Image: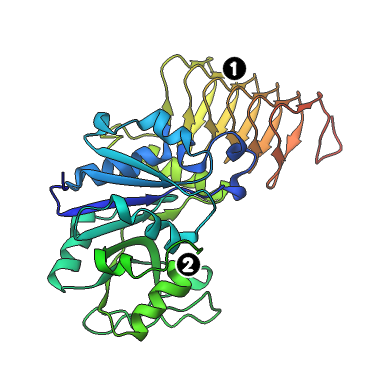
């Protein structure tokens, strides 16, 4: 059955999430807990809210995890199908690979690691109103140098695709959401890796296809790095990033059922405490993400860091801008700073790693 919105959705979730290791050794990035639900749930709920009902997930790394969790999608009011890439095909190849499952004339494609707040209906309306062959969601950012820039003309038509450059001519960047007319997906070469940004889009301009930009200033964050993951999660908790999964309950922290918070613990900065996690007396959590079963003991400080499933932070330890793998143990009075990563199951003894001389 076709989606009510007249479009199918395709979400590309095949990446290995290497920048978020060691968390992604056990779970693919779109399944990591974000404000208490797998990250992908926020996008799926936005798709459902836009009236799109058919979703095809293009999977590769740890493909089985997605279907185990989301099943047929009925809980979210969706029909979800799964297509697995046996070898990585890139963004364009991943889109082409799901072609046999597509039923609608227009196909909305999402990059599975973007946290966004834009109105998906508005993107579809731009596409239909301009009778575009492909429409790109473009978002304005303050510093576009780290992204591919996409200039548009007075009518909103895309004029070029520019790689990362030190002197960008526009602040509009590719936000990782596209609407394709189905026949343009058919044109993507099958059975080999294809980059949609480097190969498909420039070819569309060359052949004179109508490539439209939908520009807005909605919330947008690529969740690829620990820093962005922490910020995006905190923005959800504080209501800065919108999500239909979290209606109305905004504040400085989100504590899930079964978690234990001792008296005198301070939870600020959009901190998330997972199910069954424990926070000891006098602990300070600022922009922390505690996965289920994690434990932060008395007097410890965790800032802008992700603490994996069942990991433990010992008394008076400090973890700042770090990623602690599942089941790891950081001993009392340890200091882990500036991007430190502790691999799953590793046990650091009391006072075992310090950045200062006093113990």
Q: Quadrant of the N terminus?
A: top left
Which residue has dot 1 on it? 281
Which residue has dot 2 on it? 195
Q: How many labels does the image show?
A: 2
Disc nearest the viewer among 1 and 2: 2
Identify which residue, 256 or 160, lies in the foreground: 160
- Is there a contact, CB below 8 Å, between mark 1 and mark 2? no
Near mark 2 (Cα within 10 A), the count class, few <14, some 14-19 or many ≥20, is some
Q: Residue furthest right?
A: 357
What residue is drawn where x is 73% and y is 38%? 336
Circle 2: element type:
loop
Which labelled disc corresponds to residue 138? none
Q: Toward which corner of the image does residue 314 lie, by quadrant?
A: top right
Could you say where residue 278 lies in the image, as x and y percent from the top left? 55, 17
Identify which residue, 328 or 180, lies in the foreground: 180
Could you say where residue 231 lies in the image, as x and y percent from the top left? 48, 46
Identify which residue, 18 or 270, lies in the foreground: 18
Q: In this view, does 176 lie above or below 115?
A: below
């Amino acid at each position: 059955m076709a989606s009510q919105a007249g479009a199918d959705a395709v979400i590309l979730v095949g990446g290995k999430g290497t920048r978020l290791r060691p968390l992604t050794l056990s779970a693919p990035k779109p399944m990591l807990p974000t404000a208490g639900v797998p990250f992908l749930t926020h996008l799926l709920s936005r798709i459902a809210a836009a009236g799109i009902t058919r979703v095809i997930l293009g999977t590769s790394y740890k493909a089985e995890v997605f279907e185990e969790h989301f099943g047929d999608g009925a809980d979210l009011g969706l029909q979800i199908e799964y297509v697995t890439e046996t070898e990585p095909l890139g963004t364009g190849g991943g889109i082409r690979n799901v072609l046999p499952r597509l039923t609608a004339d227009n196909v909305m494609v999402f990059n599975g690691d973007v946290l966004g707040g834009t109105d998906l209906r508005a993107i579809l309306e731009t596409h239909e109103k301009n009778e575009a062959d492909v429409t790109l969601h473009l978002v304005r950012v303050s510093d576009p140098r780290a992204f591919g820039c996409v200039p548009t003309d007075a009518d909103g038509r895309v004029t070029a695709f520019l790689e990362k450059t030190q002197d960008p001519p526009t602040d509009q960047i590719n936000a990782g959401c596209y609407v394709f007319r189905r026949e343009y997906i058919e044109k993507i070469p099958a059975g080999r890796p294809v980059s949609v940004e480097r190969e498909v889009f420039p070819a569309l301009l060359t052949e004179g296809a109508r490539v439209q930009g939908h520009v807005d200033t909605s919330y947008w964050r690529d969740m690829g790095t620990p820093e962005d993951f922490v910020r995006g999660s905190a923005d959800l908790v504080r209501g800065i990033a919108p999500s239909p999964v979290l209606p109305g309950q905004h504040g400085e922290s989100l504590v899930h059922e079964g978690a234990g918070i001792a008296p005198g613990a301070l939870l600020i900065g959009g901190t998330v405490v997972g199910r069954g996690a424990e926070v000891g007396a006098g602990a300070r959590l600022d922009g922390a993400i505690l996965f289920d079963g994690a434990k932060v003991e008395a007097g410890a400080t965790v800032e802008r860091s992700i603490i994996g499933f069942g990991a433990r932070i010992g008394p008076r330890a400090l973890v700042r801008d770090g990623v602690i793998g599942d089941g790891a143990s950081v001993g009392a009075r340890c200091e882990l700073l500036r991007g430190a990563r502790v691999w799953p199951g590793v046990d650091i003894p009391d006072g075992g790693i310090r950045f200062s001389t006093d113990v």
